Amino acid sequence: MGRELLSAKNSTVNSGRNPLTDTRQNSINLPERPTILGWARSSVGSKGRQAGGVIVFLAVLGALVLLFHFTRESAPPYHWEFGVVWSFLPTLLRGLLLTLEITVLSIVFGMFLGIFVAAARLSGNLLIRVPVTGYIEVMRGTPVLVQLIWIFYVLPILAGIKLSGLESAVVAFSLNLGAFYGEAFRAGIQSVPKEQVETAEVLGLTYSQRMHYVVLPQAARNVLPVLLSISVNLFKDTSLVSALGVSDLMFLGESVATNVFRPLEILTTVAVIYFLVAFPITILVRRLELHLNRHRRK
Amino acid sequence: MDSSVTSSAFEIELVDLAKYYGTSRVFEHFNLAVKNGEVVSIIGPSGSGKSTLCRVAVGLEPFQEGRILVRGELYKSADGKEASLRGREARAVRRELGMVFQHFTLFPQLKVIDNIMLGPLKVLGLPKDEARKRAETVLARVGMAEKADSYPGHLSGGQQQRTAIARELAMDRRVIFFDEVTSALDPELAGEVLKAMHDLALTGITMVVVTHEMGFARNVSDRVVFMDQGQIVEIGAPDAIFSNPSEPRTREFLDRVLAERSRRD
Ligand SMILES: Nc1ncnc2c1ncn2[C@@H]1O[C@H](COP(=O)(O)OP(=O)(O)O)[C@@H](O)[C@H]1O
Ligand SMILES: [Mg+2]
């Protein structure tokens, strides 16, 4: 009986007729962002981990304090001067604003692109599917920093298109996200069991009604946490744009740090700012997962 | 309605059907006529084409040869050219053919009541209060009235299948195909689903039931079909099939199923 259930699930993968279920891939092939993803997945159904995250954060902070304490004994003492941070906080927050701008623009364009990527991946047409698959593999198989630099330095030479650092960043991140979002959308749609779509069809719902009432709500439930995780990762990855001279949070942090000779205070503050933005979102992801799974079997 | 003008003793007739997946044949020259209000059980080893048959009949799968008649009228033919029912009429007929699957039948994101109301609202176009009244009625019929506001994930497998049956009832089906709806259930839960199906059979709805439940096949059906490798090996009254099968293959299958059953109990 267990086998039957399994084969019923597998048939989702094998049937070659329905564009929704047509695939040569495993049905739950979520994008490979191992750390965040694995972590986000494993956090399903445990409220305690939220407290756990805070505890880990405090523990790391405590360990750092201890470390500084002991290094102070052996090495020349370092006098922490967080007072200096206050005068540069407006500068750092201006950087954060640009970081958020890059993040939001990239997410919007990436989502838009992702819809087409998912549609192409689900398409029966090889001429559409193969190139898009290639694009996804390139995006997944190369470092984001390389993609960024490539758009900024190589594109002008190859195509004669000269983009500013900011534009290059948004283009590169949008392209990157398009691949990851697209794969998430596709996986979400394919995670809906074949029987669900067929039941809806026998019920008499039209194609767009089936998508609207049956497929998309379930697909969204399955991928929303993944989309959020990808987006949080992007937020952190935007720190790479400092390599292009874009004055984001990271870039301004670095330049302030070297100018005032207080790198530890400034960079610690930068880290805390990133954390204060990202951490609530990761908590939101967990909450959302719990909420979306409320109708599932316990 | 046009379709009720032609009166035929048969609710649905599958005539000379052939179904292939690529080059592999599931069945060929397949004939089965189900009378108005009849309950036909289909038994047979797995892989013999029972599910495919249901899927072809309700229109989920195309077929390569033959035709399907509903109450004597040509509803669908393999080549599509000679189908006498088109457009609105064809859709109306199609709406009368329902199916209940073994797994994943209820929409998990919708409450029980919304699962039932979806079809009446979006397909039949009923107003909301009417759809709700209808949903409450059919839920009561399968003993699920007090679970109307539950999500499917919080129901037992038996309750889920009874809900799935209620959803078909809410659509005013004339023929319902059941594809091993109790195979994934414990005997106790299977029992309550089978009881709901038995009640349904008494109302005169036409039913085609693919099942491993020999008790149901024997006690509830009007006729039993034994299928093997895409062919009807034997068809007849339950008593004839179970007590005195004329084909050795039928006897073999029944012996094996009964032996398995007694080993499990
Ligand atoms: N989507 C499919 N693609 C290819 N072959 C299929 C498909 N579905 C069923 N078959 C084949 O058709 C035959 C009949 O299957 P099925 O109708 O599921 O049998 P049953 O329901 O009696 O177990 C089997 O040999 C099976 O492998
Ligand atoms: Mg089957």
Image: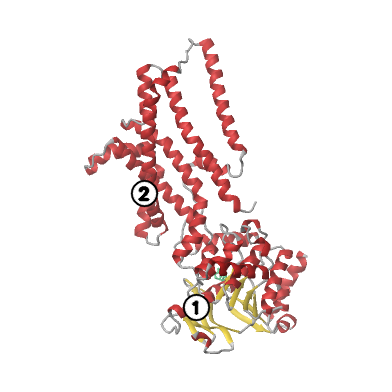
Q: Quadrant of the N terminus of chain A?
A: bottom right
Question: What label sits on residue A114 in the rendered view?
Answer: none
- The residue at 54%/70% (across/down) is B120
Taking depth in this image into account, of B96 and B138 the one nearest to the observer is B138
Image spot of residue B219 (x, y percent): 73, 78
Image spot of residue A296 (x, y percent): 61, 53
- The residue at 68%/82% (across/down) is B222
Dot 1: element:
helix
Q: Which amino acid does label 1 sit on?
A: Ala
> For mark 2, does the 10 Å Cα neighbourhood hold few (<14), some (14 to 19), or many (20 or more) residues?
some
Q: Determine the residue located farthest toward the front in the rendered image.
A: B129
Q: Which amino acid does label 2 sit on?
A: Tyr
Q: Name the residue under label 2.
A: A135
B195 to the left or right of B129 = right
Q: Mark 1 points at which residue?
A: B92
Q: Determine the residue located farthest toward the left in the rendered image.
A: A160
B122 to the left or right of A132 = right
Quarter of image, res A55: top right
Quarter of image, res B153: bottom right
